[in-house]
Image (tube, helix red, strand yellow):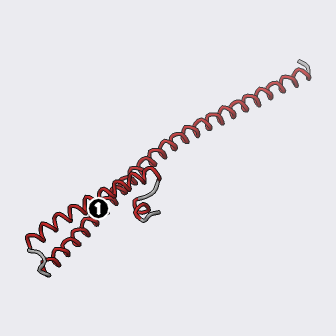
Amino acid sequence: MTKSQVYQGVMLDLAMTIATIGIGAWLGAAAQAAKAAGDAANMFQKLLVLMDKLLQISKLAKSFVGVLQTAILTISISKFVNTLAQACVMSGKCSEKTATIMSIAVSTALSLGAAGAESGASAAASQTGATFGSVAAGR
């Protein structure tokens, strides 16, 4: 073997080694990228599940606020009507029986009217994106 053949053989071995290392590095980088993409997809899926849970909690909180609003309104109506009934009896304008009947009738009418107003406001809010408070305030 001549010097030039040995030199060519060494150069060929060197070129093959560099190519093998390069391909190995490229395959390693491709595997890393695939793993990262899989991790990102898994993380995105978990994020979507978390967002769904937060939306459910938000809906539950809105329902709870609606229940509280209804309870407060009902208590307020009851106190108002009882005050009217007491004033009627104390002024001598009506008997206790009449005041009780008036109290039940007015309380029922106001509660049903408030429920109808709230459902109407909710329907308007769902169409316009407003809230019950902003509809009731005339905004």
Kindly identify the residue that appears in the image at 68 percent across and 31 percent down.
24
Q: Is residue 122 above or below residue 15?
A: below
Q: How many labels does the image show?
A: 1
Left or right: residue 36 compared with residue 109: right
Left or right: residue 100 compared with residue 133: left
Q: In this view, does 39 lie above or below 92?
A: above
Give the quarter of the image for residue 81: bottom left
Check disc 1 and report the residue beneath it.
70
Given residues 53 and 26, the one toward you in this image is 53
Q: In this view, does 7 lie above or below 82?
A: above
Quarter holding the N terminus is top right
Residue 135 spot, x, y in % from top left: 42, 60
Kindly identify the residue that appears in the image at 47 percent across and 53 percent down.
129
Name the outermost residue toward the top. Answer: 1
Name the outermost residue toward the front. Answer: 93
Residue 62 spot, x, y in % from top left: 37, 56
Left or right: residue 66 compared with residue 14: left
Name the outermost residue toward the bottom. Answer: 91
Three-letter code for the amino acid on which mark 1 is drawn: Thr
- Label 1: element kind: helix
Residue 43 spot, x, y in % from top left: 51, 44
Given residues 23 and 34, the one toward you in this image is 34
Given residues 90 and 46, the one toward you in this image is 90
Left or right: residue 91 compared with residue 5: left
Binning the other alpha carbons within 10 Å of mark 1 as few (below 14), some (14 to 19) or many (20 upward) gives some
Q: Is residue 2 above or below residue 101?
A: above
Residue 16 spot, x, y in % from top left: 77, 26
Give the quarter of the image for residue 89: bottom left
